[in-house]
Image (tube, grey):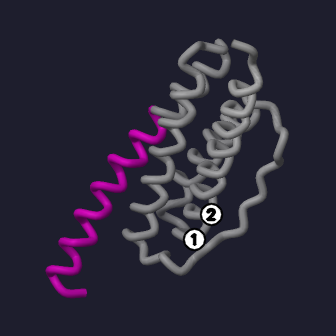
Amino acid sequence: MSENASEEKKIFEERLDKALDEAWSKVNNALDQTASLSGELEMSIRLAAEAVEYSSAMFSLTYGLEDLDPEVRVRRNSDLLMLVKGSLEALSRARELRGKSATDAYSSLRTAADCLKTAYLDQVKKSAKKPR
């Protein structure tokens, strides 16, 4: 590996570290908001979903996984709290697996992203159905 490629990979890994830390913080915030049924719930889930999606993109670029499309199964109509907890668990697994298997870690990141996307869309549907 050339010195430039090594330096580039180091930069990508540093940015990925920051992205994963931010995603971790935002998913934990979304979990807190979900548990307390806060008025900020929908926005906190959306922000967490965006942070995890960004982390996933950075992960893919850092480890050259652009062609990998892992199969992710998220149960539709799951409880909102279960989806957010599932996302946090998947994100935790991704962080743990990162050094061992980039593909397994990436699959976990995709699971986390899909859990949050499902939670967000379910919350948007519920908000739209509420009478004003």
Task: Tell me if residue 48 comes above or below residue 18 in the rendering.
Answer: above
Provide the major secondary structure of the magenta segment.
helix
Front-lying residue, 96 or 86: 86
Q: Residue at x 22, y 72 (%)?
A: 8
Q: Is residue 92 left or right of residue 7?
A: right
Q: Residue at x 57, y 45 (%)?
A: 92
Report crowding for label 1: few under 14, some 14 to 19, many 20 or more residues within 10 A (C-alpha): many
Residue designated by label 1: 103
Q: Residue at x 48, y 36 (%)?
A: 47
| SS type, badge 1 | helix
Q: Is residue 5 left or right of residue 97?
A: left
Residue designated by label 2: 107
Give the quarter of the figure containing the C terminus. top right
Residue closest to the far left: 3
Which span is picked out in magenta? 1-25
- Which residue type carries mark 1? Thr
Could you tell me residue 3's position as x and y percent?
A: 15, 81
Could you tell me residue 110's position as x and y percent?
A: 60, 58
